[in-house]
Amino acid sequence: GDKRLEDLTVEDTTCGYCAVGCRFDVYTDGDEVLATRPTEPEKSPVNGISTCVKGKFTYDFVDSEGRLTTPLVRDENGEFREASWDEAYERVVEGFQDIKEEYGGSAMSMIASSKATNEENYLMGKFARQVLGTNTVDNCNRLCHSSTVAGLARTYGYGAASVSTEDFEQADAIFLTGSNTTEAHPVLATRIKQHVKDGKELVVFDPREVQIAEYATQYTEVRPGFDQVWINGLVRYIIENDLYDEEFVEERTRGIDQVREAVQEFTPDYVEEVTGVTPEELKSAAETITSNDRVVFGWTLGLTEHSHGTENIMAMANLAAITGNLGKPGTGVSPFRGQNNVQGGGGDMGPLPDNFPGYQSITDEENRKKFEEAWDCEIDPEPGFYTTEMFLAANEDELQGMYCIGENPSLSEPGSNHASEVLEEMEFLVVQDLFLNDTAKYADVVLPACSFLEKTGTFTNTDRRVQMVKQVIDPKGDSKTDWEILQDLANRMGREWDYDNTAEIMEEMRQLTPIYGGITQERVEEEGGLQWPCYDLDHPGTERLYTEEFNTEDGLAHLQAVGYNEPGELPDEDYPLSLTTGRVLYQYHTGTMTHPEEGIQGYNDRDFVEINPEDAADYGIEDGDLVTLESRRGEITVPAQVTARIGSGTVFAPIHFAETCVNKLTDSERLDPHARTPEFKVSAVRVTPVEGE
Ligand code: SF4
């Protein structure tokens, strides 16, 4: 363009899309993002010199037509009109206070945003408990990796990746399941592919032959919903054939006898019958895992978004532990987190119904006392509702108000028709976002927030690495950062919050949160990121968990006996196919950030359904035909993509567009009993060609 480089400012920041946590320099004139470039390698340990299409180019959303720049309130006719911050704040305060007075604080709920910074998420948890007086505060982790958190916490102690990204490069073999890594975590996929090209092994188990499977030394197709069966089958094979790491099991774990007994029934023949994985495939995978010294196990939502996701994770945790693949370089477990800050904002910072920051349980009296004192408020010992439960509790009239920040539950919740009804009936709903998203349609007040390019703070990536986010452009219009809005509201509701910047918020948080005890913004900036646990200012942070001990009372990994739980809904005569859902490279979640980007819509501007050629022939469907996809809960119409990438009996649809919201088909009631994660990955459906097509 006509702008000269020396007139531009450059600031390094962390990507606001996915949790790989790439860092880059942003070139701006203070108003617009003009270019991005990977920052110097010491400041970008995860991506080095790479970024993906989203991190590199997808910034039109910041200034797109739909960007909210002033608060909106409903007028007498129920239409939105622009309002001053004063007026909007007054409405919000009145609305929240009315609910509190009439029904009590616990009738209020809050959905926090994993797109926002750690500092802001700390304040969201504090706001819920101190200002609103409710423990019902949760976030998108419930829809994705909360079963990972629950499963790993039970076995190893921390609900997080044990590894750093570097471990993938030190591994001799990588085992991936339920992860479309290339499209959902592009830069990580690039690193893995490079490693495989250098001669290392990669095993992929997945219902779809996702792109990374092309690089695999073994790709095995599985039926969705039966992961416990083949994972237990691997564990059984390894134990039966004495291929497990006896020394590690003896010294560092307990529970092997219960596991040995629990996996007895998962013989190779049984595994084949239930999952389609042949005895040869099972044996070959078991041998790859046990013949290599160092193996990393990676997964995403294909393993977690089930009505028994926690069991899947515990089975996987057993597999890594019995093969001794923990605590050493090039070994470990790595749940790839989705949203840029779901590890930090969605978990570590504790905008959660049952935990304070740093996974300190609210049911523990000492923890409660500590936070009651620090926050000067009373905290109910009873945990609040998880996100998925909020939408069920609202049915029972237990929730009357919601404050929803940077989330879009009307599209992202399972059984979205039901979620939308709940939002519509909510007595008072405040939406705080960059856009008038689908959920905002039901709001009483809409508050315009800032994007990550307009604020300073920290994000924590998928390897527990806290990294700096820096303001590179001015807030658009009258928009404000989430922390400023929360502070203004808290003060209007009788509290005295007095933060001048987010470093002060971080300071308060770290003093209450042992695993973040030594993490200050100053150190994060100077040291180019810091990984938790980092207990005090002299602690160097933790690259790899469990090198000496697990985070359990006895320091051992607690192996868990996992049996077999059938998926909640299996195909039958009326709905003969199994639907699984997921993502594509060019889009991001419900699309609020990627849809405004004209450049990428040419690649992917609508949802679709993938169907195997055999099934397509049975139903008289050809590639490109419009089809109706229907479950017991709803239907959508999308074009068919006939492809052998997906196995026969299974169909796949992405989640990105409101008009074809695939969550109309998923079920809001089938939840994981431990983590309350919905079963996004298995729904019984039927497919019919649209007449006249
Ligand atoms: Fe951003 Fe993730 Fe792409 Fe990296 S891989 S640039 S963090 S979206």
Image: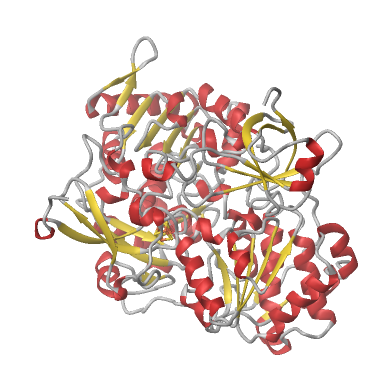
Q: Nearer the viewer, residue 192 or 469?
A: 192
Instruction: Report how many numbered discs are placed on residues in the image.
Output: 0
Specify whether residue 255 is in view: no
Q: Position of residue 474 (x, y in %)?
A: 19, 45
Is 287 situated above or below 85?
Answer: below
Residue at image point 58% right, 75% down: 332
Name which residue lies at 50% across and 35% down: 106
Is 321 above or below relative to 372? Answer: below
Q: Can residue 640 be seen in this view?
A: yes
Q: Which of 186 and 601 is in front in this view?
A: 601
Residue projecting furthest to the bottom: 247
Q: Position of residue 537 (x, y in %)?
A: 31, 75
How was this image coloured? secondary structure
- Residue at position x 33%, y 42% from top? 61
Question: Splitting the image into four quadrants, where does ligand 1 fall?
Answer: bottom left
Q: Which image quarter: residue 536?
A: bottom left
In the visual, does 211 lie left or right of 1? right
Image point 20% across, 49% down: which residue? Answer: 473
- Counting from the top left corner in percent of width and height, residue 10 is at 18, 60
